[in-house]
């Protein structure tokens, strides 16, 4: 099992009438919807997303990150937070309904096997790609990955947090809250928040990541790679964190999209390339980019 590197998007995006097979609501208007979309599930990689029709009367699709994909059973999970009329309509969808689903879209994460200590940082609605990547790393036994997932949120997490059963050296005392599903996979996770949730690190998720990185010796740091998704200020902080500790970092960008398949160029961002500055489309050239190319030192 391996995540694909940057690839052409032609012939890899599928249009399906996906059936809603489960839809669960959490605090702070957060939801997890499971869609039966076999072709998308079979081709999805950590970091890819779908462009989803949200409901009647909502003409524009919404780009939503894939949190899990099961190719054998043909389903994908999407975690989203209601913001605006489109996602409000999506929240009203019931089991058995069908939604037009375009996906999987985008270039995913590309973990390097010589950096098996993967630090996954997810903030808010940036949590889903980290869960997908964590599950992929846990399933790739040949890679001998040692992922550590850190999640930050200022609203209640979309799961019932509990104390982790997995010890993680180098973390502040009392930082024990985890995502139970990850614990069940054998993947350690820790939570960060300024909202005072029990067992969470009091601060930003990047601060928690820094605490852990600071505890590592040079040999262990040489095996670390950071993967991040969340709001732009957080991703800039992740890029700075990676620079200070001398480790590579890949970020998944969040951007408004219209077509999501590269035609409208409405989601372009400035990226530094070996040939010089270039405008890249987040939908198909990304959403995953090298952090230094998007957030260079001088930025």
Image (cartoon, rainbow, N blue to C red):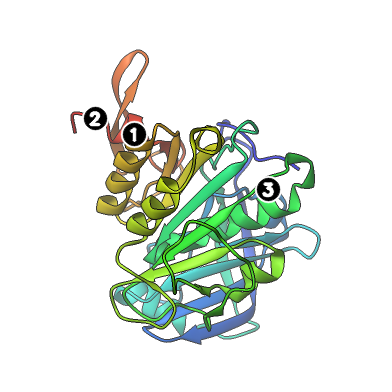
* Disc nearer the start of the sequence (3/2): 3
280 on left or right of 187: left
In which quadrant of the rendered view does residue 249 lie? top left
| Mark 3 crowd level (few <14, some 14–19, many ≥20, 10 Å Cα) | some
- Asked if the residue under mark 1 is in contact with the one under mark 2, i.e. CB atoms within 8 Å, the reply is yes
Residue 7 versus residue 11: which sits nearer the camera?
Answer: 7
Residue 27, given in percent of the width and then of the height, sits at 41, 86
| Mark 2 crowd level (few <14, some 14–19, many ≥20, 10 Å Cα) | few
Please tell me whether mark 2 sits on a helix, a strand or a loop. Answer: loop
Whole-angstrom CA distance, mark 1 to mark 3, is 33 Å
* Disc nearer the start of the sequence (1/3): 3
- Asked if the residue under mark 2 is in contact with the one under mark 3, i.e. CB atoms within 8 Å, the reply is no
Nearer mark to the viewer, of 2 and 1: 1
Nearer mark to the viewer, of 3 and 2: 2
Q: Which residue bears the numbered disc 3?
A: 43
Residue 160, given in percent of the width and then of the height, sits at 53, 84
Q: Which residue bears the numbered disc 2?
A: 297
Residue 80, given in percent of the width and then of the height, sits at 44, 71
Residue 95 versus residue 110: which sits nearer the camera?
Answer: 110
Nearer mark to the viewer, of 1 and 3: 1
Residue shown at the point (36%, 72%) measured from the top left: 86
In the drawing, what numbered circle is on residue 243?
1
Whole-angstrom CA distance, mark 2 to mark 1, is 8 Å
């Amino acid at each position: 099992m391996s995540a694909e590197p940057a690839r052409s998007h032609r012939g890899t995006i599928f249009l399906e009438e996906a059936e809603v097979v489960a839809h669960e609501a959490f605090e702070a208007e957060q939801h997890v919807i499971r869609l039966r979309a076999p072709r998308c599930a079979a081709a999805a990689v950590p970091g890819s997303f779908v462009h989803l029709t949200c409901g009647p009367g909502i003409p524009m699709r919404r780009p939503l990150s894939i949190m899990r994909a099961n190719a054998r059973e043909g389903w994908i999970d999407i975690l989203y937070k209601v913001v605006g009329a489109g996602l409000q309509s999506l929240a009203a969808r019931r089991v058995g309904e069908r939604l037009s689903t375009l996906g999987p879209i985008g270039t995913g994460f590309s973990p390097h096997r010589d950096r098996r200590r993967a630090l996954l940082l997810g903030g808010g609605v940036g949590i889903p790609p980290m869960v997908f990547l964590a599950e992929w790393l846990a399933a790739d036994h040949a890679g001998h990955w040692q992922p550590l997932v850190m999640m930050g949120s200022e609203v209640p997490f979309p799961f019932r947090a509990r104390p982790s059963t997995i010890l993680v050296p180098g973390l502040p005392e009392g930082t024990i809250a985890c995502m139970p599903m990850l614990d069940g996979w054998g993947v350690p996770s820790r939570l960060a928040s300024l909202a005072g949730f029990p067992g969470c690190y009091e601060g930003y998720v990047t601060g928690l990541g820094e605490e852990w990185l600071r505890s590592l010796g040079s040999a262990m740091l040489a095996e670390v790679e950071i993967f991040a998704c969340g709001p732009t200020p957080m991703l800039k902080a992740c890029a700075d964190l990676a620079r200070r500790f001398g480790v590579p970092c890949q970020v998944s960008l969040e951007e408004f999209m219209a077509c999501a398949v590269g035609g409208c160029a409405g989601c372009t961002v400035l990226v530094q390339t070996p040939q010089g500055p270039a405008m890249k489309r987040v939908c198909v050239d990304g959403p995953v980019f090298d952090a230094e190319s998007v957030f260079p030192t001088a930025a």
